[in-house]
């Protein structure tokens, strides 16, 4: 996972995206919206369980998390499993993340899997030792 700039243009856009449920990051701190705070008379715009305050000034620097599968443009060699995210049953080429489905990943072969983790170079070196 990596972080990329959220491309927020205005404070109004930042507010709308937070209220829609998006989470942002700035210098390792999580920025979110939690309407439960409203019932206690507090701001629902939060940063590390505190009111957002000065973080509003830096909205253009806020980042979003991007997972490896968010924009698959070419197949990714992955360990796959249907039982657990930590299991590594076999390695296959994954070509897409299936949206809104209990079966999450589709292989080039057409087979589908619940879990997929990209194979790392260190994994390949361990297998040959």
Image (cartoon, grey):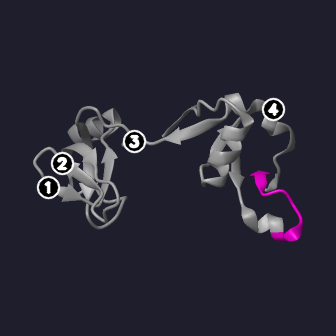
**Nearest-to-viewer mark from 4 and 3:** 4
Above or below: residue 58 compared with residue 50: above
Quarter assignment of residue 118: top left
- In the image, 104 versus 90, the foreground residue is 104
Mark 3 falls on what kind of element? Answer: loop
Q: Residues within 10 Å of mark 4 (few under 14, many from 20)?
A: few
Q: Is residue 73 left or right of residue 36?
A: left
Residue 128, label in figure: none
Read off the residue under disc 4: 57
> Is 111 within the magenta?
no
| First in sequence: mark 1 vs mark 4 | 4
Residues tagged 1 and 2 counted as in contact (Cβ below 8 A):
yes
Which is nearer the N-term, disc 3 or disc 1? 3
Counting residues from the start of the chain, the first of labels 3 and 2 encountered is 3
- Alpha-carbon distance for marks 4 and 2? 44 Å
Give percent across and percent down for residue 79: 27, 49
Quadrant assignment for the C terminus:
top left
> What residue does disc 2 label?
107
The residue carrying mark 3 is: 70
Position of 39 with respect to 69 (left or right) is: right
Q: Secondary structure at mark 1?
A: loop
Distance, label 1 to label 4, CA atoms, is: 47 Å
């Amino acid at each position: 996972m990596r972080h990329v700039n959220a491309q927020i243009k205005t404070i109004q856009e930042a507010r709308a995206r937070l209220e829609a449920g998006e989470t942002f990051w700035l210098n390792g701190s999580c920025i979110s919206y939690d309407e439960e705070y409203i019932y206690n008379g507090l701001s629902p715009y939060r940063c590390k369980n505190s009111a957002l305050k000065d973080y509003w000034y830096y909205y253009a620097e806020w980042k979003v998390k991007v997972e490896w599968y968010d924009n698959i443009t070419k197949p990714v060699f992955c360990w796959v499993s249907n039982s657990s995210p930590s299991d590594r049953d076999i390695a296959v080429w994954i070509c897409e993340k299936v949206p809104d489905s209990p079966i999450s990943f589709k292989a080039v072969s057409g087979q589908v899997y619940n879990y997929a983790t990209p194979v790392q170079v260190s994994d390949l070196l361990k297998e040959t030792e």
